[in-house]
Amino acid sequence: MRVATWNVNSIRSRLDRVLDWVARSGVDVLAMQETKVKDEAFPHEAFGALGYEVATFGFSQWNGVAIASRVGLGDVVRTFPGQPAWGDPPAVEARALGATCGGVRVWSLYVPNGREIADPHYEYKLAWLAALRQAAGDWLHDEPTAKIALVGDWNIAPLDTDVWDPAFFAGRTHVTPAERDAFAAIADAGFTEVSRAHLPGEHVYTYWDYQQLRFPRNEGMRIDLTYASPALAAAVTGVTIERNERKGAQPSDHVPVVLQVDVP
């Protein structure tokens, strides 16, 4: 089974590209982030024509997550226990969606950006990650043999080699010790970051800004990652990053990351 994650940066703007890649790749499950569309406006029919069921979670033109599956889509849950709220008045954002697909519990996650270190959104990001770590640990405690995938745009580069120039990012979000510690805490809960385990190395990126020719210069970041429970990590046989999907007309600034999973 092939499970992918992709920050599509607006499903309505990238629909043709996403559908084309889904058809070419033969992916079984696609977790999407930044769909930027209300649930009722999501293009369910277009995915259905390719044989995929879709679960969505979106309120407006901001945030939004979805999961498309051709191997079943059950036990759909919006938000995880303890997920913090944001805004005035505070509300839980459309950033986490879980569903069981082909025996794998897939969570499509769009971690808050953090904006600037002095911005309240940075503290919100850390609180969001802490709540996710607690929820993930509880899931594994309750069902140690469960196959759980925490996939998505984490908005964190865990290592200096995950950014094109560490000096450029000094004093900015995505690379601070607190963010990296919050990311590493998911491993402390018993999960393994399988994309790096199967695809290590430097200059391995999943995101390139649209500005200043970042993609042609390969000035990117590795921020789209997958944490897997022990049972799922043992079943992952390979990982690919679909770099070519950043090329061409109107691409997302992220590319798909695909897990090959050996499941019955």
Image (spheres, helix red, strand yellow):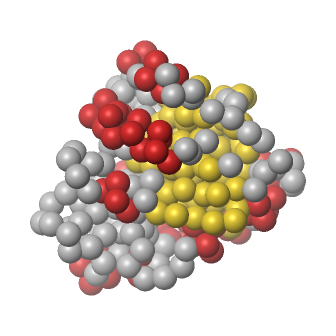
Which residue sits at x=27%, y=34%?
13
Q: Return the x and y of residue 22 as percentages of the image width and height.
A: 47, 41
Residue 120 seen in this snapshot: no
Which residue sits at x=26%, y=73%?
219
User: Left or right of 77: which side holds 5?
Assistant: left
Q: Nearer the viewer, residue 183 or 19?
A: 19
Query: Which residue is at the far front?
Result: 24
Q: Return the x and y of residue 126 as percentages of the image width and height.
A: 49, 58
Q: Return the x and y of residue 103 as percentages of the image width and height.
A: 78, 41
User: Left or right of 110: which side holds 107?
Assistant: right
Query: Which residue is at the far left?
Result: 212
Q: Classify residue 217 by image quadrant.
A: bottom left
> Where 214 sits versus 127, above or below?
below
Q: Nearer the viewer, residue 78 or 215?
A: 215
Q: Return the x and y of residue 135 as percentages of the image width and height.
A: 69, 48
Count of marks overlaid on the render: 0
Which residue sits at x=45%, y=53%?
256
Q: Nearer the viewer, residue 76 or 178?
A: 76
Residue 246 seen in this snapshot: yes
> Where 180 sits versus 56, above or below?
below
Which residue sits at x=45%, y=49%?
6
User: Left or right of 75: which side holds 44?
Assistant: left
Q: Classify residue 259 by image quadrant.
A: bottom right
> Where 113 sits versus 219, above or below?
above
Q: Nearer the viewer, residue 64 or 250?
A: 250
